C-alpha cells in the first residue's frame, strides 16, 4: 500500500467517529502522493503520521450562569495542531454543532492555510458547543470569562494566538481579551480581531471577505476577465459573507443572493448591503427581515435552493459541507465559472469533483479564505512592534498576500503536472514549507 493511503487508513482507524476530520484528511493526503514519492525521506521520518496527529488537544468544562440563575455546562476545545513554522494560530468557533471532529478538521486545514500566507504562523483551532444566538450580552460575557479562565494557561502571544470564527466576533473577542488581561496582568497580542481601541488592526474585520474577492479577481485577470457585471451568489450573511459582498460590489459585480441558517433572499436588483449590515451587524436579526425593507426581494425558507440560482461566481461563506454534489451540479448546469470558498470546507469531496470535471475554476478554502488569518498575523506584527498601520497599508499588504497565494498555488499545480487544479496546488505549496520545517526540527 502507498504511504499516503496507509496513513489515511490508520487515521480513520485511530480516530473513529470523526467524519469531518476524515474528510479534510482525505482531501489533503490524497493530493500529497507526488511529493512523498519525490521525498522518500519523509516516510522514513514518519512525517505524515506526525502531520495528522495534533501536537496537543485541550478539552475542558465551561460552567456559566444564565440570566435565569441556571447553571449551564458547555464543552471547550483548543487543538494545538502544528507549531513547525510559528505559534499556533487559528480561530475559535462558538456553535452548537461544535465537536472534536470539527475542531480537528479546521485545525488541519489551518496548518496549510497559514503556511500559504507566507507568514510565520502554525496551525490551531478551538471553540465550544455554546450557542451565542439568542443570549444576552451578559450571558455571552459570563460564558467568555469562564472559557478564558481555563484557556489562558494554554495560550500566549508567542505560543498560541486564537481569533474569531463562526459565532465569535468583536463582542466575544472583547470579553475574552478582558478576562485574559485580568488574569495574566499583561496587555499583549494574545488574541487577534481585537477592537481598534485596544490593539486591533485596521482591515482585520474586512480581511477574509476582501481577501476572497482579491484572489478571485486575480484568477479572473489571469483569464483576461474582471468582476465587472459578474453575477455572484454568496452564502451566509456573517463576517466573511458581508465583506465579500462589499468588495465584490465595489469592483462592479452584482450580488443577487445571500442566506442565514433559516433561508435565503434573492434580490434581482442586487443585494442592498446596508440593509444586510443593519439586520446582521447591528440588530443580530434574521435575513428574512430583508424583504420588509426591500419589497422586490424574495425570501425562501431553507438554504439549499440558493445554489439553483444562475450565477457566474459562487462564494460559499457559511459553513462546512453546504455544497453537495447535487448543488454543485445545479451550479454547473446554470453556468457557474468560478467557485471560491470563503467558508472552511464548504464543498463536499463529491462537489469538488463535479466542479473539477466541469472545468470550473475552483479556489479551495485554505487559499481563498487565508486573508483573514494573514491579516491576523499582520495584527500580531503590529502588536509586538507597538505600531499601527493605516487602512491603506494593511489593505495593500493583504492584497499582495492574496495575489501571491494565487500564483504560488497556480505554479505548484503546474510544476507537478496538474495545471488548473488548485486543490493540488494549495495542498502541495502549503505542505512543502511545513514539511521542511518539521524535517529540520528532528523527530518532535
Ligand atoms: P459568522 O458567525 O459571522 O457568520 C456565519 C454565517 O454562516 C451566518 O450567516 C450563519 O447563519 C451561517 N451559518 C453558520 N452555520 C450554519 C449552518 N450550519 N447552516 C447554515 N448557515 C450557517 O461567521 P464567519 O463569517 O466568521 O465564518 C463563516 C465561515 O468562514 C466559516 O466557515 C468560518 O470557518 C470561515 N472563515 C472565517 C474567517 C474569519 O475571519 N471570520 C476566516 C476564514 C474562514 P446564522 O446566523 O443563521 O447561524
Ligand atoms: O479559519 C480561519 O482562518 C479563521 N477563522 C481566522 C483565524 C485567525 O487566526 O485569524
Image (cartoon, helix red, strand yellow):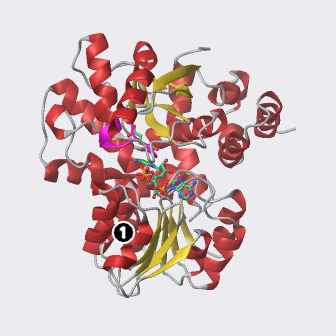
Q: Is residue 253 visible?
A: no
- Quadrant assignment, res 358: bottom right
**Quadrant (top left/top right/bottom left/bottom right) for the N terminus:** top right
Q: Percent position (x, y) of residue 8?
A: 77, 37
The reply, left or right, for residue 141 in relation to residue 321 is left
- Circle 1 residue: 217
Ligand 1 within 8 angstroms of badge 1 C-beta: no
Question: Foreground residue, 67 or 4?
Answer: 67
Number of marks present in the image shown = 1
Residue 76 located within the stretch drawn in magenta: no
| Furthest residue in direction front, as rendered | 68
The reply, left or right, for residue 42 in relation to residue 70 is right
Element class at badge 1 = helix
Q: Is residue 205 visible?
A: yes
Q: Percent position (x, y) of residue 89?
A: 42, 31
Kindly identify the residue that appears in the image at 59 percent across and 14 percent down: 444
372 relative to 302, above or below: above
Question: Foreground residue, 380 or 267?
Answer: 267
Kindly identify the residue that appears in the image at 66 percent across and 31 percent down: 52
Kindly identify the residue that appears in the image at 30 percent across and 76 percent down: 272
Q: Percent position (x, y) of residue 404?
A: 37, 53
111 relative to 239, above or below: above
Determine crowd level at label 1: few under 14, some 14-19, many 20+ residues with C-alpha closer than 10 A: many
- Quadrant assignment, res 364: bottom right
Q: Percent position (x, y) of residue 242?
A: 35, 62
Residue 168 located within the stretch drawn in magenta: yes
Give the extent of the magenta segment: 163-172
The reply, left or right, for residue 23 in relation to residue 90 is right
Question: Foreground residue, 265 or 440?
Answer: 265
Q: Main secondary structure of the magenta part?
A: loop
210 relative to 264, above or below: above
| Furthest residue in direction right, as rendered | 1
Amino acid at each position: 500500500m502507498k504511504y499516503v493511503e496507509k496513513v489515511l487508513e490508520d487515521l480513520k482507524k485511530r480516530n473513529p467517529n470523526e467524519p469531518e476530520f476524515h474528510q479534510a484528511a482525505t482531501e489533503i493526503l490524497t493530493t500529497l502522493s507526488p511529493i512523498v514519492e519525490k521525498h522518500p525521506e519523509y516516510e522514513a521520518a514518519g512525517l505524515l503520521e506526525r502531520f495528522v496527529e495534533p501536537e496537543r488537544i485541550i478539552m475542558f468544562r465551561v460552567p456559566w450562569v444564565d440570566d435565569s440563575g441556571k447553571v449551564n455546562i458547555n464543552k471547550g476545545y483548543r487543538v494545538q495542531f502544528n507549531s513547525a513554522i510559528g505559534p499556533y494560530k487559528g480561530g475559535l468557533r462558538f456553535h452548537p454543532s461544535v465537536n472534536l471532529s470539527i475542531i480537528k478538521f479546521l485545525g488541519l486545514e489551518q496548518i496549510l492555510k497559514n503556511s500559504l500566507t507566507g507568514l510565520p504562523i502554525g496551525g490551531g483551532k478551538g471553540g465550544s458547543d455554546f450557542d451565542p444566538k439568542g443570549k444576552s450580552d451578559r450571558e455571552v460575557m459570563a460564558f467568555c470569562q469562564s472559557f478564558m479562565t481555563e484557556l489562558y494557561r494554554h495560550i500566549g502571544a508567542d505560543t498560541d494566538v486564537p481569533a474569531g470564527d463562526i459565532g465569535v466576533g468583536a463582542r466575544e473577542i472583547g470579553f475574552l481579551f478582558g478576562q485574559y488581561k485580568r488574569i495574566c496582568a499583561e496587555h499583549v497580542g494574545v488574541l487577534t480581531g481585537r477592537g481598534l481601541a485596544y490593539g486591533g488592526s485596521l482591515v482585520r474585520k474586512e480581511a477574509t471577505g476582501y481577501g476572497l474577492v482579491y484572489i478571485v479577481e486575480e484568477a479572473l485577470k489571469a483569464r483576461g476577465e474582471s468582476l465587472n457585471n459578474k453575477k455572484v451568489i454568496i452564502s451566509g450573511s456573517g463576517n466573511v459573507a458581508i465583506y465579500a459582498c462589499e468588495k465584490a460590489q465595489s469592483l462592479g459585480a452584482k450580488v443577487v443572493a445571500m442566506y442565514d441558517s433559516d433561508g435565503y433572499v434573492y434580490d434581482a436588483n442586487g443585494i442592498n448591503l446596508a440593509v444586510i449590515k443593519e439586520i446582521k451587524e447591528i440588530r443580530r436579526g434574521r435575513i428574512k427581515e430583508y424583504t420588509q425593507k426591500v419589497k422586490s426581494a424574495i425570501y425562501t425558507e431553507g438554504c439549499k435552493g440558493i445554489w439553483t440560482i444562475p450565477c457566474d461566481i459562487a462564494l460559499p461563506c457559511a459553513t462546512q459541507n453546504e455544497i453537495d454534489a447535487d448543488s454543485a451540479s445545479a451550479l454547473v448546469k446554470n453556468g457557474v465559472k468560478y467557485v471560491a470558498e470563503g467558508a472552511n470546507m464548504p464543498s463536499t469531496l463529491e462537489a469538488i469533483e463535479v466542479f473539477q470535471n466541469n472545468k470550473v475554476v475552483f479556489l479551495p478554502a485554505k487559499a481563498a479564505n487565508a486573508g483573514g488569518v494573514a491579516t491576523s498575523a499582520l495584527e500580531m506584527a503590529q502588536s509586538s512592534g507597538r505600531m499601527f498601520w493605516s487602512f491603506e497599508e494593511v489593505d495593500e499588504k493583504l492584497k499582495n498576500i492574496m495575489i501571491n497565494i494565487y500564483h504560488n498555488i497556480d505554479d505548484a499545480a503546474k510544476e507537478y503536472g496538474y495545471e488548473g487544479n488548485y486543490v493540488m496546488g494549495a495542498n502541495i505549496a502549503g505542505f512543502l514549507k511545513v514539511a521542511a520545517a518539521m524535517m529540520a526540527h528532528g523527530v518532535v
